[in-house]
Amino acid sequence: MIYFRNVSKAYRTRKGRHLVLDNQSFDFEIGHNYGILGANGAGKSTLLRLVSGAEPVSRGRIERRVRVSFPLGFAGTFNGYLSGRQNAKFLARAYGADLQKVLDFVWDFSELEAYFDMPFNTYSSGMKAKLSLGLSLAIDFDVYLVDEVTEVGDARFRQKSAEAFRSRARQSDIIMVSHNPNTIKAYCDRGAVLNNGQIEFYPTVEEAMKVHSKNMQVTDE
Amino acid sequence: MAADQSHNTDATLSSEEVGGLRLGALHGLYTAATETGHLANCATISAEIAKRRADNAGWHRVASQAHIDIGDLTTALKFAETTHILEPQHVGHLTFLAALRSRTGDYSGAVTLLLPLASSEQATSGVYLQIANAVSNLSRPDLAIAMIKRAIKVDPSNVGAGMMMASFHARAENWQAAIDAMIGTEARCGVTEQTRRAISGYYTQAGDLKAALRAIDDALLRSPGKPEYLLHRFGVLRRLDRLEDALAVLLEMLEIDPKNLWARRQAVSVYVEFGTIEKALQHGAFLVEQEPNNDEYLNCMRHLLEVRTGKKLADAVGDLPSVKQMGSSRGFRQAPSFRQQCAAMVHVISALVMREILVRNGRNRLGFFWALVEPLVHVSVLAVIFQFTIRTPPPLGDSFFYFYFTGIAPYLLLTRVTQQVGHSVMGNRSVLEVPVITPIDLAISKMIVEVFTAIVVVLIFGVIFQSLGQNGFPILPGKVLAAFMLAATFGFGLGMIFASLVEFGRLAETANVILMRVFYLTGGIFFLPELLPPMFREIVTWNPFMHLVALTREGYYGFYNSSALSLPYIFTVAIVVLAIGMTLLWAVSPIMRVQK
């Protein structure tokens, strides 16, 4: 369970204060995959960062009774001077995971071979993504945060990551942000719509989509 | 004879055959050829007649036109030249010749012919337009525009002149002028489908897509289903992002002409944007069937098929929602206990410490070596300078080197901890993207690495002194340990204060440097506070660092008992600074996570 209690989140932009959440209370329940819909700039990614804890709230309280991942495929924390293995060890240690199990999984999954022991800044963007995806899947999180599904590698690798993801998702949950309605439909069973600082939850993705497209039409006119 | 002639009209005649006939017969044959539309015969016969009637301009003109019709422009030009020589005053012949010269690329020839006419009374708008066309090809658009203006003046109802004017502006990419020219033309000559089509094109280029759409819709009302107009309308709709309407246009075009490959190719793209891969594949298959060797179509199909397998991938995880609906196997988690929280913090800090050591040595293989050499050089330089400038022995013992070392060691520990902790958040913001890592973890890990380094350095120094026959290790290790612990605590507190303040401006870094300079100069590294005049001693004892040096020296020398040292004072300062530092860092932590 992830509880949001009276949470407000605003940040300053050049155009003034931007309100992402306005005194909202809601829960992400265990056992469900949530797809978050919202217009561009509504703050979907910020909401995801709030859930993870990488972003502080402006007001209110968030309580996490689960182990929440960092956004999937995120490579920003990796140090360029350290090898893939050393970076993997760092995150595995920080999350208190079984070091050998994590390293074995990442080695098998990411298919970096010799590059696994080369400095991270020698990697291509595809290799970086593979390493970070492998690492996210290697550590056992209760909730995986996905900010836009990034497609990595060839068809075979994508098949592999989809399968790995599916086997993880049996026990763990997903909170996902995507522009692609098909992706959300494929992964999520519940939907939420973020609009003007308000968030509404819906028991099915279809209902959330209906509301979302209605919102979009209103803003168009 | 009649049968013979009809036979002849069908066959293509050679010039030799024609040469044997009488003039009267030739006239008859020519009429027959024009009636049956046999262009080659028309040309041959009219050429023969023109040859026989060398002074007749009319027949030369006919022969010239006939050769234009069969595409033999060189011969046509010869006949046209003759018409002009035979009747130099005939405006029709003259403009005809000029047009032909323009067509064969002799623009200056055309202009020479037309210019005298332009200034005469007989000049029609057609003449001006011809000149405009020729001079524009001679890279004189300014003259061309002047000519078109004259053409419009002579004949305001000439649609061609107006459209030509607009196209000249368009060539210079002056779309607004082109639009204005077209609006003017429509006002003078009335609205036609061509003017509407042209204006729509210019609106598209100018970026006013809504006006462009209105114009092309008008044109299509006047001429429904014209492929070129439909194509343009599709382009406009596409740029307007009205994909469904654009698709409707394409389907209309395909209904009119199923073999319109261009429209079909566009339909594939639009279906792909809709995400209806199956439809896109159907149209793609038709394209490949029509042109099996077209690389673009083949690539397009290959791509589509790959996308379809990609969609199958999405289908592979497609049962996830139903899996979720069946309920999760994972139970609720209790809120973490204090022990679990501590364990998590230990995990994070140990990870950060390992990473820090690796990064330091990864960036610079000599990282640890420098940590060792720096104090050595520092102490040596000071010792050498004082040994040779001051003849008196050091205030304690007999070695300047040892005396300075006992002052520099706590100083390095204090400054390194302060600096590293003070920079820990600023320099590692990306690590804070991992939610489990907090600023306090960063600060603690930096402090641990620095203390560890300092201890190793002090031990190595001890070994060096010992091997040189001097006493390298403290007589009272407890006092040195206490001094180092207090220095680490004090530096940790200061570091956290600076780490918090630096979030509000780089001034904090300068303040840090100045504070350390004051500590360095007044801390008693080079002197003993006891030996100072009472007034200075009073000031110096306010410096917390002085007490750290005094405590260190008490430990190393054993016999030294500093009267300036106040343990309660330095202990209180260290604890208070630590408390302030922790409070500040805790308060500023949320801001540190905000991406800057």
Image (cartoon, coloured by chain):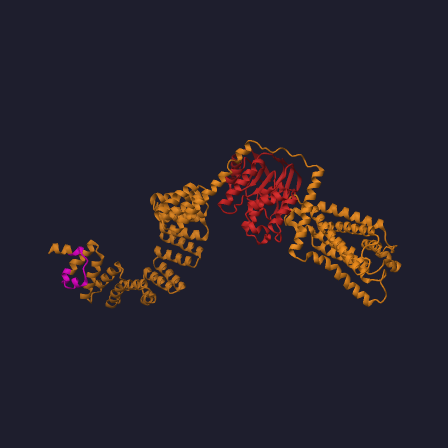
Determine whether, in the image, residue B395 is placed left or right of residue B158: right
**Relative to the observer, which residue lies in front, B41 or B596?**
B596
- Main secondary structure type of the part rendered in magenta: helix
Could you tell me residue A53's position as x and y percent? 64, 42
For the magenta stretch, what is the residue range? B8-25
The chain in red: A
**Relative to the observer, which residue lies in front, B550 or B133?**
B550
The chain in orange: B
Determine if residue B515 is in view.
Answer: no
- The residue located at (69%, 43%) in the rendering is B345
Determine whether, in the image, residue B49 is placed left or right of residue B459: left
Q: The N terminus of chain B lies in which quarter of the figure? A: bottom left
Q: Is residue B148 magenta?
A: no
- The residue located at (54%, 33%) in the rendering is B323
Determine whether, in the image, residue B207 is placed left or right of residue B416: left
**Relative to the observer, which residue lies in front, A111 or B464?**
B464
**Relative to the observer, which residue lies in front, A150 or B533?**
A150
**Which of the 4 image quarters holds residue A173?**
top right
**Which of the 4 image quarters holds residue B462?**
bottom right
Determine if residue B329 is in view.
Answer: yes
Could you tell me residue A26's position as x and y percent? 62, 35
